[in-house]
Amino acid sequence: MSKEILINSGIREVRAAVLTGGNVSEIFIERVNKKSAAGNIYKGKVVKVLPGMQSAFVEIGLQRAAFLHIADIYTGSSDELSYEESMPEDDSEANENYDKENSETRVSEEIHSEQQHYAPIAEILTEGQEIIVQVAKDAIAAKGARLTTHLTIPGRYLVLMPGYEHIGVSRKIENEAERERLKDILVQLRPEGMGLIARTVSDGLSLEELKADLEYIKGVWAGVEAVTHSSTAPSLLYEDHNLIYKILRDVVTADTTRILIDNKEDYDKMQEFFVNHLSNLDLKIEYYQGDEPLFDLYNVEIEVNRLLDKKVWLRSGGSIVIDQAEALTVIDVNTGKYVGRHNFDDTILKTNLEASKEIAHQLKMRNIGGIIIVDFIDMERVEDREKVLTTLEQYLKEDRAKTSVVNISPLGLVEITRKRVRDSVTRIISEPCPYCEGRGVIKSKITVCYEIMRQLTQLAAHHKGANILIEANVDVADLILEHERESIDNMEQLYGVHIEIQQNNSGIFDRYKLKITGYKH
């Protein structure tokens, strides 16, 4: 299916949307004040070694020290990596966005987790030691960035892996004859002391085209080496490209027919990149000069706003509800308005099948990573469960990010893991609500009313004869006056206090104050 890419480029924010078959399938956002560090290479300084966790914290110049686990430290042992182990699980698509999972060729965490025995980290790292690292995952929520010493330099068609003397081909290239052809080319091209991996988009390319890409990324690595010795930790040695170049490098494929961008300067740069790196594609890059905003013209702005909705309606009338926590996302499937036409089992099956497609779409659109638990509607028939699971897996295969699915449980629960490199789009465009402080709910008026009365009782008992002022939301104040007037009168007589209620303009039910303003004479 043909793709179009729309790029809205502003001074401090760049947004890109991928349209597949005319519908928005992915959205990317990059802001000047919060640029992704994923893929950047730093000279860092070890600030703390934690032997009990086989981990270390490394200062690389970000707001928080970054985290480095023993599994992500390359020791260079000859038996550490085999040919197949070193291959990327799913090429550049093994990321939760356009960013690399420390580039797609980084040796996967799954491979490392299978290696049961590591040398004590204290024998490898010491506090104060300088070390060359690459950011594998951006800082997310309260967690700092995750690092690796498995350095990779991605190009358009190839990825250079300094220190690895092997070759690999993306597993998404399934034709065996093509795989063997690419391997033969990589054997000829591989620089000494370095590894090479052919990305998915290298399928069908000639030796000359791959060689040109290799020369480019070798030049990038030479630049990193040149500044390494003259730099002091912490310092940035290599910064990955901005969003526009990442789109051209990682998102554009053979089925991309057009890129539309609304910034003339960036348009000119894209044209230059196209001539140097993408001239083999039948792709048009156009400068949009219309009066209507580009994202409004193609209804992308509506889709961006919908990313904040917890409930997503299905065509049939069913719905899915998405709840994101820090490390876990839960998706609940409901029949909603859909009552079916035949029998109950068919109604459930159709809803679950439709939900499978929408779930895969929303994970990609919102860039949700980590662990995802899907609560499908319970299905009695085993064949229905298998059909839903197969359908879900089929749609997830279209995702460039690496995903894995666990078999559906008797309760209808499915566990999905999706590779996460940076925050979800939802978190990028939002912040915790100042009213509920991110909890999603606030106390009811009546709950706050009773809470105030309990605290008022304690305050009056400890400050007899005092003048007490209650400042509360207008609705809560009215509720106290309406339902608790008798309790307040009794309290004033019992403790000799004077209680005054004052309305505030906070607009938030659970924002209130109780204070002593003086004592009765």
Image (cartoon, rainbow, N blue to C red):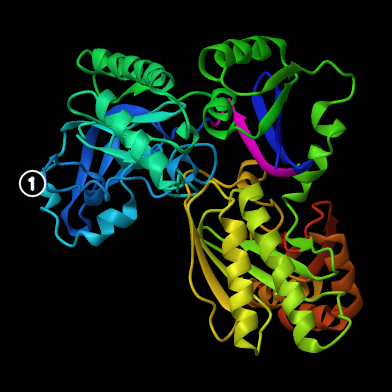
Is 26 contained in the magenta span? yes
Q: Is 23 in front, or is 50?
A: 23
Residue linked to disc 1:
123
Residue at image position (39%, 50%) is 89
Q: Is 167 in front, or is 89?
A: 167
Q: Is 48 in front, or is 400?
A: 400
User: Dot 1 surroundings within 10 Å: few (below 14), some, or many (20 or more)?
Assistant: few
Residue at image position (18%, 59%) is 52
Q: Position of residue 359 (x, y in %)?
A: 66, 61
Is 501 contained in the magenta span? no
Q: Position of residue 408 (x, y in %)?
A: 54, 77
Relative horizontal placement of residue 481, taking residue 398 as reference (left or right): right
The segment highlighted magenta reads: 24-34
On the image, which quarter does residue 165 sit in? top left
Q: Amino acid at mark 1?
A: Glu
Looking at the magenta stretch, what is its main secondary structure?
A: strand
Residue at image position (50%, 34%) is 201
Q: Is residue 34 above or below residue 148?
A: above
On the image, which quarter does residue 514 sit in? bottom right
> Which quarter of the rendered picture does the C terminus lie within?
bottom right
Picture mark count: 1
Q: Position of residue 363 (x, y in %)?
A: 62, 54
Residue at image position (46%, 39%) is 92
Q: Is residue 38 above or below residue 465?
A: above
Q: Position of residue 61 (x, y in %)?
A: 36, 29
Q: Is 433 in front, or is 460?
A: 433
Q: Is residue 470 above or below residue 27?
A: below
Identify the element where label 1 is drawn.
Answer: helix
Outermost residue to the front: 177
Q: Is residue 265 visible?
A: yes
Q: Is residue 375 visible?
A: no
